Image (spheres, grey):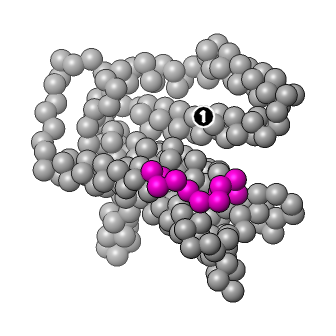
Amino acid sequence: MIALEGNWIVLNYDSLSIYPSNAYLILAIGAAIIVMAYIFNRFSSYKDDTNAKDNREFINKWWTETDSKIMNWVLAIAILSLVIVAIYDWPTAFKLFYIFLFVGIAGFGFLYIMHGERVDQPDEETYKPITRKFLDLIDYRRHPFNLSFVIFVLVLISFLLSKEFGIPLDTEVSGNPRYVTSLPASAFVMSGLMLASTFVYIINNSDIFGIRKAEQNEEKVLLIHFMEIMCCGVTFFIWLVTVISAFI
């Protein structure tokens, strides 16, 4: 919910004079759901049904068949749709591209996190006590409050308050930007990383869509941390400069 509403807020910043009041309500509901789900999970016990079917077998098959005909057809239809829409309305094609990109990131993240065995090989890396405590703090198998979520919320709050108090932000979605990417574009990509982190937490604590709970090692978590260094770092830097520039 936060990812969908947040992306709408990010991508429509320059086309709105002020955001509707329900934008605040939807974000608040989304945040409340995350907190409530985390609290509920902490105080509930998971009952493992050994006889239940595990749809992970389907996910593993899909993941290994990289030449899947279905995937090729989906990609072809998406590209053809973009070309047809672009011929008649370029701005609409641009928005459609973002929708396809978000669905693609979310879908790939879901398949990547969910595939594998129910119990991965144990963690072999050893760390110093201080490093171990830090990694435990940002271990997304333990909680859903990841770094991309925090920065994404900061961006959303700044966009909403910017319109509310009439302090324009230079999002650089057109013209000659100072950076390789714009703040809306980087925040949009970061929302996909936020979903992947959430999938890590979900599958390590419960079943989802018939996919059984899986005890994973740190490999996928560390890969997300590596992506955060690039994506979240760039987004936070651009956001910080943009907010400071708005007040100068």
Magenta-drawn segment: 13-23
Q: Secondary structure at mark 1?
A: helix
Q: Position of residue 161 (x, y in %)?
A: 53, 69
Image quadrant containing the N terminus: top left
- Amino acid type at circle 1 is Gly
Determine which quarter of the picture holds residue 174: bottom right
Q: Residue at x 59, y 66 (%)?
A: 163
The vertical placement of 114 against 49, above or below, is below
Q: Residue 209: x percent and y percent? A: 34, 26
Residue 65 x/y as whole percent: 57, 19
Relative to the observer, which residue lies in front, 136 or 74? 74
In which quadrant of the rendered image does the C terminus lie?
A: bottom right
Residue at 36% across / 31% down in the picture?
117
| Near-viewer residue (95 or 77) | 95
Q: Residues within 10 Å of mark 1 (few under 14, many from 20)?
A: some
**Quadrant of residue 232 within the rendered picture:** bottom right
Residue linked to disc 1: 104
- Indicate yes or no whether the magenta region holds residue 135: no
Looking at the magenta stretch, what is its main secondary structure? Answer: loop
